[in-house]
Image (tube, helix red, strand yellow):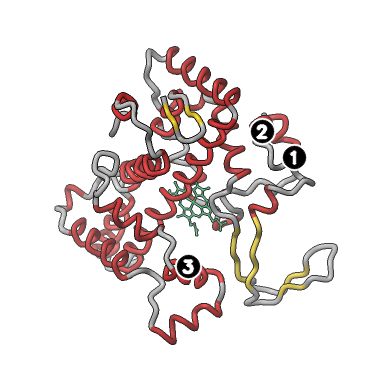
Amino acid sequence: MFNCSDYVKTNQPINMTDMIERIALDVTGYCLFDSEFNAMNNPNSEFRKISKIILRSTNENTIRRMMKIFDSANVLKKLFDFQDISPKVHNFFFNRLEDTKKLPQCELTTENDFVKLMLNIRNKELADGKDVTFTDEIIASNMRLFFEGGFEPASTTLNFCLYELAMNPMIQERVRSEIKRVRDSRSGFFEFNALDQLTYMEMVIEETLRKYPPQTMLHRICTKTYRIPESDVILRPHVSVSIPIYSIHHDERYYENPETFDPERFTTENKARRIPNTYIPFGIGPRKCLGSLPCIQRRSPSSRGSIVFRFESGCQVR
Ligand code: HEM
């Protein structure tokens, strides 16, 4: 892992967006792949390079995003043999899977690496003469899904969180004192359980996810005819439905002064008063975000501990 203090000691301005992305990558590697991605120490690490290919705003990536939402965009796929995943990204995860497969059986035991878990299940199914659930294609696709789904929303959230803390010094001071109090009560260490004591910090993160949900829309395909209650709107099978997370989170009917950053909206009492399903940064229903369960990165010591530093607008940190 890395130490933010080393960067601060250089007394140079820090590009926090870049740093947060690298922190989120390293945490993703540690929590999901049981690997050192080394993005913090090495800006040119292979995972950093692949993350840039996935995230950068190119025409190809825009078309790929549209293909996930609009069926009509799939015409491009047929007409131009356009791949919905960049071949570079596809090969990267396949090669990594091939490397993992070469490991001896005794090294496939870690519980921190879901790729090894899937390989273990597959080996057991093969040994029992059953059909295989996790083909190479499924494992490699899930590696990409977890990689992308894991680090991108977490780094976006941390970026907006630090921005709001820089713009709201009083909120920032309250977060810092809470972190210092909890840290000092634990002889300077944040073990996992201590993070539960950071209740105000939790409210700040929840408010960040309200104001800046990393995924602004949810998408579903209707499977059976459904009338929206108390309306004449009927949804037919195969119709594509978009649920506007961002608009719901910014609707004055649910959040007074929605553009104001106000963590008090997330006190226990205020949460209990909220109309159900008007706070959905992690989606809703059976396809809800897997990361929202233990919310691995949100609870990582690195993401919380970093706010012991003081942030100022203009990305100054001291
Ligand atoms: C701030 C953090 C995160 C936010 C805001 C977020 C948000 C979301 C949203 C809105 C969805 C779509 C859910 C739906 O359609 O109802 C989703 C899906 C998903 N997320 Fe996250 N996510 C976060 C972190 C993570 C992390 C850390 C992981 C890795 C463990 C992860 C893994 C996934 C996966 C695998 C799916 C697809 C689930 C499925 O289709 O069944 N996410 N996430």
**Element on which disc 2 rests:** loop
Picture quadrant where residue 132 is located? bottom left
Question: Mark 1 or mark 2, which is nearer the start of the sequence?
Answer: 1
Kindly identify the amino acid type of the residue bearing the numbered disc 3: Thr
Residue 124 figure quarter? bottom left
Q: Quadrant of the C terminus?
A: top left
- Residue at 46% in and 35% down: 315
**Residue at image mark 1:** 257
Q: Name the kind of residue labelled 1 in the image.
A: Asn
Residue 25 coordinates in the image, percent (x, y): 35, 45
The first of marks 1 and 3 along the sequence is: 3
At label 2, which amino acid type do we have? Asp
Q: For residue 239, which quarter of the picture?
A: bottom right
Whether tag 2 and tag 1 are in contact, CB under 8 A, the answer is: yes
Residue 210: percent from left, percent from top = 62, 43
Q: Nearer the viewer, residue 21 or 312?
A: 312
**Looking at the rendered structure, which numbered label has been put on residue 62?**
3
